[in-house]
């Protein structure tokens, strides 16, 4: 009985740790997706700028993911076709020292502009 416990208990603990790590990765991924969506909205709204998109995405990352996303980066590019490309990337926080899971999200939308009729 003791011999089996020597193998079963560490295996069960590793399974639990991997499950918790998967949950941390899923949370970080959702936060990065949310930050990219908020950044895209701020950059493409009428009168919005790429700098406003970066600021909004970084604010979402700070408020929602202070410890969930490690080394976050936000890039907003205005493309030649009138679209804005927002990329948010980082790594999920880890409870396992050898596991560094990347998370990223990319959103692309056209810039809103006012056009008069006639």
Image (spheres, grey):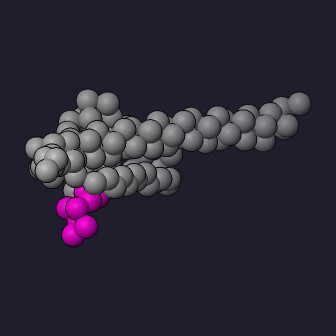
The outermost residue toward the front is: 118
Dividing the picture into quadrants, the one containing residue 62 is: top left
Q: Residue at x 83, y 32 (%)?
A: 2
Q: Quadrant of the N terminus?
A: top right
**Image location (x, y in percent) of residue 117:** 16, 47
The outermost residue toward the right is: 1
Nearest the eye: 5 or 46:
46
Dividing the picture into quadrants, the one containing residue 8 is: top right
Nearest the eye: 88 or 118:
118
Q: Could you tell me if residue 60 is visible in this image?
A: yes
Figure check: 39 above or below 107: above
Q: Residue at x 54, y 36 (%)?
A: 23
104 is within the stretch colored magenta:
no
Total number of numbered discs in the rendering: 0
Figure check: 10 above or below 109: above
Q: Residue at x 13, y 50 (%)?
A: 118
**Image location (x, y in percent) of residue 107:** 36, 52
User: In this image, 76 relative to 105: left or right?
Assistant: left
Nearest the eye: 18 or 7:
18
User: In this image, 24 relative to 36: left or right?
Assistant: right
Figure check: 81 above or below 50: below
**Image location (x, y in percent) of residue 25:** 49, 43
Q: Bounds of the magenta span?
A: 78-85
**Image location (x, y in percent) of residue 68:** 38, 37
Nearest the eye: 7 or 91:
91
Q: Residue at x 85, y 37 (%)?
A: 4
Q: Could you tell me if residue 43 is visible in this image?
A: no
User: In this image, 117 relative to 97: left or right?
Assistant: left
Dividing the picture into quadrants, the one containing residue 60 is: top left
């Amino acid at each position: 009985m003791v011999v089996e416990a020597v193998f079963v208990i560490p295996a069960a603990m590793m399974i639990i740790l991997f499950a918790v790590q998967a949950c941390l990765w899923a949370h970080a991924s959702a936060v990065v997706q949310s930050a990219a969506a908020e950044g895209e909205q701020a950059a493409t709204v009428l009168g919005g700028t790429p700098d406003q998109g970066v600021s909004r995405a970084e604010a979402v990352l700070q408020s929602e993911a202070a410890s969930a996303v490690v080394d976050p980066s936000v890039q907003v590019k205005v493309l030649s076709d009138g679209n804005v490309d927002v990329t948010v990337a980082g790594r999920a926080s880890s409870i396992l020292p050898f596991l560094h899971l990347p998370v990223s999200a990319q959103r692309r939308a056209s810039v809103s502009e006012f056009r008069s009729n006639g």
